[in-house]
Image: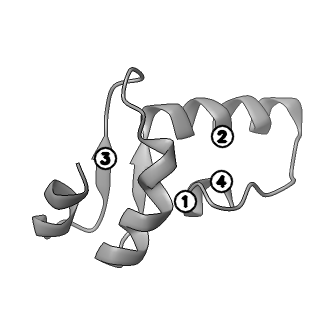
Amino acid sequence: MERLACIRRDSLDWLAGTAWHSLEVVDKLEQRTGKPVVTSNQVLVWATFLKAGVQQPIHGYGKLLE
């Protein structure tokens, strides 16, 4: 998974599918590629926090959650 993100040239890497264990590598992928990485699981957490009014950042799981 990390290798795939490193060879892409888009402005954003999207990792779709909630069965992947991708949250653990999002921060590393963003550092390695220099671009945002967004996963389905991140979006679910982000949307839930947004609706609940939670504004506390979660570090280590990518820029979306920070």
Q: How far apart are marks 3 and 4 (CA)?
A: 15 Å
Q: How far apart are marks 1 and 4 (CA)?
A: 6 Å
Which residue is label 3 attached to?
Answer: 14
User: Residue visible at 36% across and 64% down?
Assistant: 29
Q: Which of 19 and 42 is in front in this view?
A: 19
Which residue is label 1 attached to?
Answer: 62
Quarter where residue 17 is shown: top left
Q: Do the residues labelled 2 and 4 touch (CB within 8 Å)?
A: yes
Which residue is label 4 attached to?
Answer: 65
Going by the numbered disc 4, the residue's amino acid type is Leu
Q: Looking at the image, is mark 3 or mark 2 earlier in the sequence?
A: 3
Q: How crowded is mark 3: few (under 14 residues within 10 Å), some or many (20 or more)?
A: few
Q: How far apart are marks 1 and 2 (CA)?
A: 11 Å
User: Residue visible at 36% across and 29% down?
Assistant: 20
Residue 27 against residue 24 in the figure, above or below: below
Going by the numbered disc 1, the residue's amino acid type is Gly
Residue 21 horizontal/vertical position (percent): 42, 33
Q: Nearer the viewer, mark 1 or mark 2?
A: 1
Which residue is label 2 attached to?
Answer: 46
Secondary structure found at label 4: helix
Q: Nearer the viewer, residue 53 or 34?
A: 34
